[in-house]
Image (cartoon, rainbow, N blue to C red):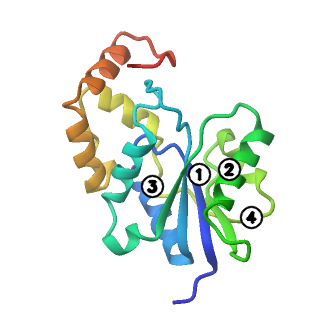
Amino acid sequence: MTYSFDYLVYIGRFQPFHLAHMQTVKIALQQSHRIILALGSAQHERNIKNPFTAEEREQMILSNFSQTNQQRIEFVPVIDVHNDEKWVELLKNLVAAVVRPEDKVGLIGHFKDESSYYLQLFPDWELVELASLNNAISATPLREAYYRGEIVESEFPLGTRDFLQKFMHTEIYQQLKQKYLSDDHSDIPVE
């Protein structure tokens, strides 16, 4: 099969990985030999906005794909750097450690809102711009429902649903849920 790219980079927090994320990965796998998922907010502290570690997100994401496609998905954990220039440099260095100099690298994503401006920060990478997928819901209301004890099954692929079910039985989930229900939505880490 001939692909337009050797690698497509897909940047996201995937907290949690929902159907619009999955559609984007599937489109990327149609256009690229491999995909690099840049897992944002990869520092180890958990909070209401970032309940899952980078390793847990890798497991969650891979559980939704066949063995063959799993082998085409790479991950790079990206810590939050509150400076666009430094963040771009960090991400480019992480990607450079995965790809070869001769590889054609692109970026895939869609302009959801003002937070999507980062897609314009990589002029060296051709952008595969997608329209909003599946009337793409934000992960925020899905997380909020999750902290209320609900899994919005219609918005998640099976692997994610299974992951979320199991995670509900952990002490960490209970701490996050209590923090959410106490109306303390600050970014104070959960132990």
Labelled pair 1, 2 in contact (Cβ < 8 Å): yes
Along the line of sight, the residue nearer the viewer: 137 or 122 = 122
Spatial distance from mark 4 to mark 1, Cα to Cα? 13 Å
Residue 115 shows up from this direction:
yes
Q: Nearer the viewer, mark 3 or mark 1?
A: 1
Find numbered disc 4 in the image and state the secondary structure of the residue it sits on.
loop
Circle 4: is it few (<14), some (14-19), or many (20+) Cα within 10 Å?
some
**Which residue is painted at 40% across and 51% down in the image?**
58
Residue 130 shows up from this direction:
no
Q: x, y percentage for residue 94?
A: 64, 53
Q: x, y percentage for residue 87?
A: 72, 41
Spatial distance from mark 2 to mark 3, Cα to Cα? 23 Å
Find numbered disc 2 in the image and state the secondary structure of the residue it sits on.
helix
Circle 1: is it few (<14), some (14-19), or many (20+) Cα within 10 Å?
many
| Label ID, residue 103 | none
Question: N-terminal of the two: label 4 or label 3?
Answer: 3
Compared with 68, 95 (above or below) is above
Disc 4: which residue: 125
Question: N-terminal of the two: label 1 or label 2?
Answer: 1
Find numbered disc 1 in the image and state the secondary structure of the residue it sits on.
strand
Q: In the drawing, does residue 159 fall left or right of residue 114?
A: left
